[in-house]
Image (cartoon, helix red, strand yellow):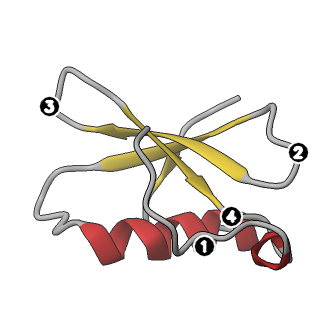
Amino acid sequence: MNEIAVGSARTEPERQVEKALAAVTERGRAEHHLLPVTGGLMNSNWRITVEGKPKRCFTKLPGAGTDSFIDRSRPRNT
């Protein structure tokens, strides 16, 4: 599976993770790349690589309808 450059989303899940990434970071000039991570039942899972940074990040976006059975307003330690 190939990484996807941020700004070149083609599918709805790709657009959703781009929107979430834009909400939490100022991208500046660094290139960001996304790679879907398989294994979630309802969530959309992604590995994020930032050009010039030695570590990658992981994010998950809640699946549609999961708010009806998961209370996301409660703080958690993870």
Task: Name which of mark 2 and mark 3 comes first in the sequence.
Answer: 2
Query: Disc 1 on helix, strand or loop?
Result: helix
Q: Which residue is mark 4?
A: 62
Q: Which residue is mark 1?
A: 15
Task: Name which of mark 2 and mark 4 comes first in the sequence.
Answer: 2
Q: Position of residue 75 (x, y in %)?
A: 43, 61
- Characterize the local packing of mark 2: few (<14), some (14-19) or many (20 or more) Cα atoms within 10 angstroms: few
Task: Name which of mark 3 and mark 1 comes first in the sequence.
Answer: 1
Q: Which residue is mark 2?
A: 41
Q: Position of residue 30 (x, y in %)?
A: 17, 51
> CA–CA distance between discs 2 and 3?
32 Å
> CA–CA distance between discs 1 and 2?
19 Å
Q: Residue at x 34, y 29 (%)?
A: 56
Residue 8 visible in this rendered orientation of the protein: no
Which numbered mark, 2 or 3, is in the foreground of this view? 2
Query: Disc 4 on helix, strand or loop?
Result: loop
Residue that extends furthest to the top in the rendered view of this protein: 54
> CA–CA distance between discs 2 and 4?
10 Å
Residue 30 visible in this rendered orientation of the protein: yes
Which numbered mark, 1 or 2, is in the foreground of this view? 2
**Image vertical order of residue 78 relative to residue 63, above or below:** above
Q: Quadrant of residue 7?
A: bottom left
